[in-house]
Image: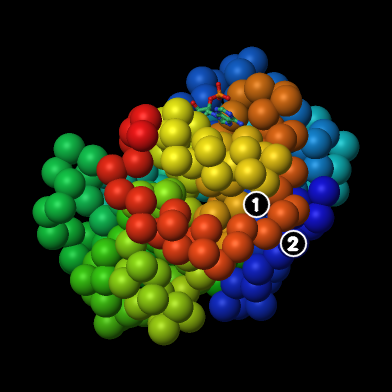
Amino acid sequence: MPALRDTFMLPNGQSIPKLGLGTWQIPDGRPAYDAVTMALAAGYRHIDTARAYGNEASVGRAIRDSGLRREDIFVTTKLPAEIKTPAGAEDSFARTLAALGLEHVDLYLIHAPWPWSQMGTDHTAGNQAVWKCLERFHAEGRARAIGVSNFSERDLNAILDIARVPPHANQIKFFVGSTPMALIGFCREKNILVEGYSPLGTGTLVANATIAAMAQRYGRSAAQLCIRYSLQHGLVTLPKSTHRDRIAANADVDFEISGPDMAVLDGLTNTRARRA
Ligand code: A2P
């Protein structure tokens, strides 16, 4: 499927498949192993995980067992949001590579600017210190590209102030009804590639009547419309599923949403499970 072969270019010149499998909330063991195995068999070449998901070992095993060449699979993982010290980052990255069973990752992200239990608090010094570690992992070739996730403009500026290597990517939540366009514009101005997670609003958008009705006009599912919407906004898009048929269908998105329909979707707010 062409959508699986399309790539964006990271600022370091590395190509990154536009569509990847998200693995948040897929338990370690059989579920994560099977989901990644099914995705690779369906033609996905981009897998997104995180140490905080607790499934790196199974994700890595599925990648290694796939028979595909390592250089043909783009693997992203993340430094836990709670770790804001150089020693902690060193230790965590070593554990991540050991769990994955890989010598390098293609993209390594700071998972969030604040520990999840302290959302919105300022950890500028910690993020700056940790960024210097990511720059070292990058220089060593253990992380081909480096970036951040859930970073606001203010959080990004704190990194840009001290960076020798500016972040290559910012992975943020992006779905119909949750579209931080100002932040996306800022990232693009700074040459930071934007990745969107939860393109289905963690599954709730498929129950939205407006989205479902529009999808039907295109002969597509609501999930496919939502994934296409994120791709058409120019974001790396990371739908998650554990079902073979959905994993395949979520990548079958080679159609075009019209300008007027994109505008309708842009105007939708409060989309979570809205039924009118
Ligand atoms: P499942 O893993 O059982 O398929 P998001 O990518 O926005 O985080 O959404 C993920 C959620 O959406 C999961 O609960 C997943 O469930 C569900 N999902 C994924 N693909 C589809 C699809 N094609 N149709 C309906 N639900 C889907």
Q: Amino acid at mark 1?
A: Leu
Residue in the image at 35% along x and 77% along y? 186
**Along the horizontal axis of the image, is 175 left or right of 85?**
right
Can you say whether 18 is above or below 269 in the image?
A: below
> Residue 81, how many percent across, how many down?
31, 46
Cα–Cα gap, marks 1 and 2:
8 Å
Q: Secondary structure at mark 1?
A: loop
Q: Nearer the viewer, residue 178 or 85?
A: 178
Ligand 1 has an atom within 8 Å of the beta carbon of the residue at disc 1: no
Q: Nearer the viewer, residue 245 or 74?
A: 245
Residue 6's tag is 2
Instruction: Mark 1: give few (<14), some (14-19) or many (20+) Cα within 10 Å.
Output: many
Residue underneath mark 1: 19
Residue in the image at 53% along x and 38% along y? 213
Tag 1–tag 2 contact (CB < 8 Å): yes
Residue in the image at 61% along x and 58% along y? 257
Residue 120's tag is none
Q: Quadrant of the C terminus?
A: top left
